[in-house]
Amino acid sequence: MLEASQYYFNQAAKVLDLRPKTIKVLQTPYRVVKVEIVSESRDGDFLHHIGYRVQHDNSRGPMKGGLRYHPKVDEDHAVALASLMTWKTAIVNIPYGGAKGGINCNPEELNDQELDDMTRVFVSHIKEVIGPNLDIPAPDVNTNAKIMGWIMDEYSKYYGFSPGVVTGKPLHLFGSEGRSEATGLGLTFALEFVLKDKKMNFKDITVAMQGFGNVGSNAAKFIHERGGKVVAIGDHKGGVCNREGLDIPAVINWVNEHRTVAGFPGGDPFSSDEVLTWDCDVLIPAALDGVLNEFNARDVKAKIIVEGANGPTTPAADEIFKQRDILVIPDIYANAGGVTVSYFEWAQNIQQFRWELERINNELYKTMSNSYKDIVSTATSKNISLRTAAFVLGIGRVAKATIARSHFKNNKFEEF
Ligand code: NAD
């Protein structure tokens, strides 16, 4: 993950003609926090975990990014993901920097009481460096609205009522309308803009997707509502396909009950891995990183890939897609709907005023549309891929802000 994010950064840095010293300033995280978490276990013993919060850059505003609870969480992973958040918030032009973090743990082994206790100890150890004007965590892999509620409650014990310290909270606890669907809806908007440019319509496309969690299921719902045919879905337990298009509301009901698409009666089963090379127009990887790689990129049949997951495409696969003229809508733009609506949630918390769903979705559309236009015009003027253009745009905006705030004004970023 760290290698891939550095590879994509370096490609953009070349286009921007950044000096090595500027590159160092932009790549080095502002602050890396590593804490020991000793919490209570259900049998009265203690649990021991390590937690991280990496704050990458704050030149454009308070830092923003998710908290992940997973056995693979470590410093390198958090550094890579935190830097991607910095470029992502700049690409969609919301007033934030980037951060990421989490706890190295296996949440499947923890009950709610243990998760609650571990989360609260973590908050008590990082409370001095997070806050509504400093760094605002959000849900990520294996964390959810309930956990965000605990974070708000624990932080508020020290600093008083502070709903703006965290986003992705439950709707009844200062969360926002539209937040849970936002990443899937933003992804659908991104696909709509590309289809429009290609003089195509949702009714013309077949879609295959890997992952049917928050991102995948919501993207499927919005694509289905617009007339697109979702013909294959693969998840961690299996796959289901239907050439006529799956009945997505029925699949959602099935998954709510069975926690997997496997066994859904309105289609045929297949082995989940095959979904990435499915015969379709649009492929949406919405599960894991590194799944599109040098081993399968030549077999991908889709002509458009919309990256719902973070980092699904390795640099080697990215090169193959370029050679094969497969259009990739990159993760740092395509899945930015979630952080955008997190920003709306934070804005509502700070204003102590609620926005209606229609306003949220209109603002999300505007944000996704404006950044799409910015990315396409950068890609066209510099003859580069959408991914490199997105990085150029994000890094350029951060570099400009960094230099404008510093007393070293000898770099020129006027064109970005
Ligand atoms: P989730 O936990 O809700 O869903 C994950 C899905 O991936 C599930 O359907 C699961 O079955 C599937 N999966 C897991 N292992 C798999 C495997 N080996 N093969 C096939 N499928 C597998 O997660 P999510 O929130 O939907 O996030 C998915 C991705 O999108 C992650 O990379 C995450 O970082 C990224 N993302 C999420 C958001 C958000 O708002 N939720 C925002 C931006 C990016």
Image: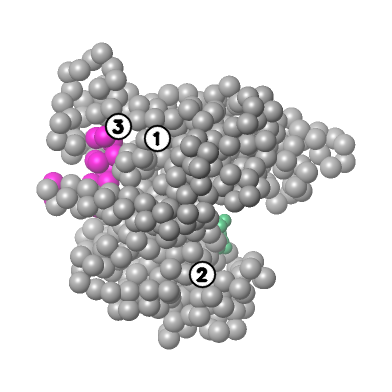
How many other residues sit within 10 Å of disc 1, few (<14), some (14-19) or many (≥20)? many
> Residue 234: which disc?
2
Q: Identify the image quadrant of the N terminus.
A: top left
Reading the image, the residue beneath label 3 is 398
Q: Is residue 48 visible?
A: yes
Q: Is residue 234 above or below residue 141?
A: below
In the rendered image, residue 390 lying in the magenta stretch gets the answer yes
For marks 3 and 2 on the same chain, the one whose residue lies earlier in the sequence: 2
Alpha carbon of mark 2 to alpha carbon of mark 1: how far?
34 Å
Q: Is residue 51 left or right of residue 398?
A: right
Range shown magenta? 382-398
Q: Is residue 374 left or right of residue 278?
A: left
Residue in front for this viewpoint, 150 or 141: 150
Q: Helix or strand or loop: what does disc 2 sit on?
A: strand
Q: Identify the image quadrant of the C terminus.
A: top left
Q: Are marks 2 and 1 in contact (CB under 8 Å)?
A: no
Which residue ends up furthest to the front in the rendered image? Answer: 353
Q: Helix or strand or loop: what does disc 1 sit on?
A: loop
In the rendered image, residue 99 lying in the magenta stretch gets the answer no
Alpha carbon of mark 3 to alpha carbon of mark 2: how far?
37 Å
Number of dots carrying numbers: 3
**Foreground disc of the pair 1, 3:** 1
x and y, in percent, of residue 142 in the image: 61, 50
Reading the image, the residue beneath label 1 is 96
Amino acid at circle 1: Tyr
